[in-house]
Image (cartoon, helix red, strand yellow):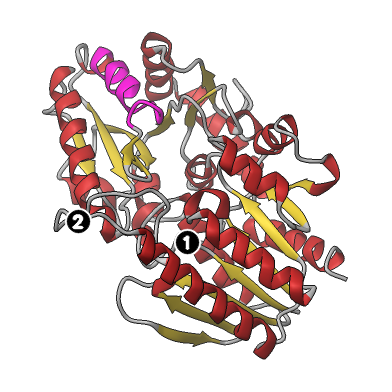
Amino acid sequence: MNHLIISPNSPFLSVGGIERYIRNLIDFCQDQPGTYHFILPSKTKEETVQIENVSIHFKSFINLSYKKRKGLDGRRESKKQTKDKSIEFFEFLNTFISDKQISAVTAENFHLGLPPSYSLMLNMVCHSKNIPLFLHLHSFSMNPLQTEIINGLFWKKVLCVSKSVAGDCFQKGLEISHISTKYLGVNIQEFTPKRDATWLKKHLGIPSSHKIIVTASRILQGYSDILTEKGIINLLDAFSKIQSTRSDVHLLLAVGKPPQRLHAEFESALHKLEGYIQIHGVEDRVIVKTFPMQKMPEVYAGADVFALPSENETFGQVFIEAMACGLPVVGTNVGGIPEIIHDEENGFLVQPNDASELAQKLTQLLDHEKTRKRFIQNGLKTVSQCFDSKKLFAQMFQFIAKHSS
């Protein structure tokens, strides 16, 4: 199989769930039969990097977001720029798919990550060449245009990262025969309890006897901050209740770094986050920090509890990463999270926007060693049995091959 994967999210430009998935997929493909091509955004330099049987093509025409914004120089991205880049995308693909004898194409989150013209042009190229085209959804449809991109174009199948996303697609009119749930996974050789558990506290200058509650999340969705949606403000409220009675607990907010083009928006979101930290009176014991993707296993391994109390979540990659590193988890009973966390078995599920309940569950995991050990053991079992990326990627490519013939 000569497979082409196109993603507007790149692990070489930003940090997030889709980016980690792409990096894991690149690593996986190097050990598989066939040839794999990735088209990823480039900030400046365009180049092709060859790693074994994997070619990564960095292209500036895909480093473009749908929504208009004011640039750092005060000017707005123009419709002409979008038109020119989408035409460049079309012309490149039209030649590339034929020259490389591509047998299947997967588009990652195209309904959300790129202007609608990209989905149209990708469909036109693949449809004209009779190449099966798969849409991989990492996010819910947020408006009628995104729904129409999912429902109305010539996708062979729509692969959803959770049953929650699949159910959302079905509810919004996509035929059930076009929907398949394909969970994301975690590299259990990289994310493991065997990582250095002492690095994080040394790095942050926190006494080894103290405890850390950690969350890991983006704080931007496109150009808007998502502090409320990701439950970070609620987590600050819960932490303020905990820290008022004990001085040995810290909260680490490991925030995902966005592409450089969103630098101004990211700084604005950080400034807003700092304001909420001061409002809750926890500035002395809350740390906000970005980490390179490769350091996240040490971040998880060095913490004591993981929490992400989102108002909604399509899947929750960070939960399986934390579990794989031997960390007990707390999540909300929304979206795809209950497909990972089974309440009272391998973690706690709480209701969103309930700071008191969240504080109670976090305190329980900080203090009750028996519950911690049970959640850790069951979490490791959950990841091994259900979310091993090698197993899941193999199943996904088998599915794609089956429906490409």
Q: Is residue 11 visible?
A: yes
- Seen as rendered, the residue at the extreme top is 356
The quadrant in which the C terminus is found is bottom right
Q: Is residue 367 magenta?
A: no
Residue sitting at x 77%, y 67%: 132
Left or right placement of residue 233 versus residue 285 in this view: right
Q: Position of residue 62 (x, y in %)?
A: 45, 67
Q: Give residue 75's mark.
A: 2
Q: Position of residue 387 (x, y in %)?
A: 65, 48
Q: Is residue 238 magenta?
A: yes
The foreground one among 158 and 144 is 144
Main SS of residues in magenta: helix
The foreground one among 363 and 240 is 240
Residue sitting at x 75%, y 57%: 154
- Seen as rendered, the residue at the extreme bottom is 99
Q: Is residue 32 above or below residue 201?
A: below
- Say which amino acid is labelled 2: Arg
Residue sitting at x 18%, y 26%: 277
Q: Is residue 189 visible?
A: no
Residue where numbered disc 1 is placed: 8
Q: Which residues are magenta?
A: 227-241
